[in-house]
Image (spheres, grey):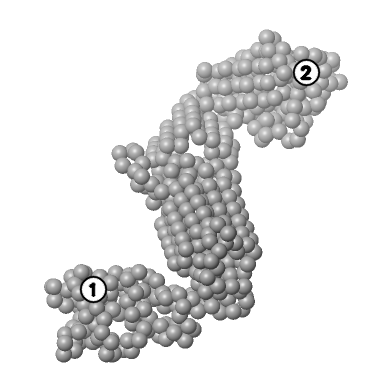
Amino acid sequence: MSSDASSSSIVRLNIGGDKFCTTVDTLTHREPNSMLAAMFSGRHTLCKDSEGNVFVDRDGKHFRHVLNWLRNGVLPPNLTDSECSEMLQEAEYYQLLGLADRITEVLNRKKDAKEMDTDLTRTDIIKWVGNAGYENFKLRGVNLSGLDLSNLDLSRVNFSYSCLKNVLFSRADLRFASFENANLEGANLEGANLQHAYLGNANLEGANLKGSNLKRVNLKGAKLNNTDLKGANLQGSYLPHMNLQGPGLVERINEVLNRKKDGKEMDSDLTRTDIIKCVRSKKVNLRGVNLSGLDLSNLDLSGSCLRDCSFVNADLRNALLIGVDLRGANLQGANLEGAHLESAKLNNANLKGANLRCARLRHPEVLWAQRADKVYLTIAVTNAKDMAVKCEPHGSFNFSAIGSKDETFDVSLELYGKILPESCKTQMGLRNILCTVQKEEKGWWKRLLKSEGKPAPHIKVDWNRWCDEDEESENGKFSHYDIHKSCYPSDDEESSDDGMLYLPDLEKARK
């Protein structure tokens, strides 16, 4: 092809005697792998008629529809089945795969519509919308499965509880429309304008929302399994209690979050608040999302599923990440100073270069035993510093200390009975801290904590100091014990338990 045939060059075509005029860009842009794109790539010699038109030996009856598809990606809405079949042959000849898929989709929808026996046709809806006016037009509970409603103005229409399976809504105006509890399974909403629409509890499984405008849409409770959201605008949308798994969402969030410049987010379709809504919803699975560099400091993300997420250089200072699933997450260089990570799943997580100063990674082991007048709590923290113990009369016990690696350990217990804070004592050793908590009234507690049920895994009975109520008055092992020895074990004891509290000999403890 000559040099003057640039993308904006005008091309005159002779398709089986029918003349058409277009540009190289139109013929090559939308379907770059088609025969037409190859013809005008400059690599092939073109056959021309006596007037200089590029000649293609093909019936030109439907070529205007082919050109319109290449221009704007839209098919005429009222094609008959025979016309669709003829168009499909042309699409296959020109190797226009996108057009072929679209025609096949239309044919399948028509087939589904016939099988489903829809209540209305496209023509019915066009007439009714024009006559009834938007405010009074309601399609609640109707069956419109498989209809082609593309490019129509359906703003403010009420589709609540309707069956809209496989409906073609592409490029339709659906602003302020209501789809409450509607079945939109497999619907095509590509490029549709859904601003301020209500999709509460709608079924959008397998729907196509590519490039749609979902600004300020209410998606509470919507089912979005395998929904394609690539390029969708979700700014200000209400997203709680959704299943957001499927193609498009992760890519969309990554696209938005990666648009940063000098540490500040540029104008984006998703705000920080939108991301927080997604993450905090207990039914949201954001596995694999890229949150690198994002400021999530001081946020409560407890219980979220953030498995395989990327938090490279993210700011997570003082964030509540209790019980969060962070397995396989990349936290390289993240700032986790003061973050709460108790009970978080960190298997295979990358913490290289992360700032864990004062981060609460886990609960220390707590061993307990009691006498009629007191409770003994042995807390396993090696070389503790900056220790703080606070007791409240109603039974609240709070302990904090910094370990040998500058990690912070916390223990908060609501004890079974009331206590005397002024009489509580602590003694710090190399490997543990012994806290003696004085009971307000003498008596044996049924358990350590007020709450019934099995205690947390880090709270265990100290069988080496335990005795039953009827044993306390007897002379022997349990009448007293050496606190100093407990906190400062001998060298032999240290070598046997490798620096941790030794396991009890249960048989010996019961003699």
Query: SS class of the residue under badge 1?
Result: helix
Which residue in the rendered view is the most extreme toward the front?
131
Q: Which of 102 and 468 is in front in this view?
A: 102
- The residue at which mark 2 appears reads as 371
Q: Residue at x 42, y 59 (%)?
A: 211
Image height check: is 190 above or below 333? below
Residue 15 placed where, x, y %?
A: 28, 86
Q: In this view, does 443 lie to the left or right of 455?
A: right
Q: Which of 389 and 319 is in front in this view?
A: 319
Counting from the top left corner in percent of width and height, residue 257 is at 40, 46
Where residue 161 appears, as percent x and y from the top left, is 63, 61
In this view, 467 is above or below 330:
above
Decide if residue 147 is in sight here. Answer: no
- Quadrant location of residue 145? bottom right
Q: What residue type is labelled 2?
A: Arg
Residues under labels 2 and 1: Cα distance? 92 Å
Q: How crowded is mark 2: few (under 14 residues within 10 Å), some or many (20 or more)?
A: many
Amino acid on which the number 1 mark rests in the picture: Val
Q: Dot 2 lies on which element?
A: loop
The residue drawn where x is 33% and y is 38% is 263
Residue under the image location 39 percent in, 71 percent down: 74
Does label 2 or label 1 sit earlier along the sequence?
A: 1
The quarter of the image holding the N terminus is bottom left
Taking the spot 50% from the left edge, 35% from the top edge, the residue there is 299
On the image, numbered disc 1 is attached to which residue?
Answer: 24
Which of the image's four quarters has the C terminus?
A: top right
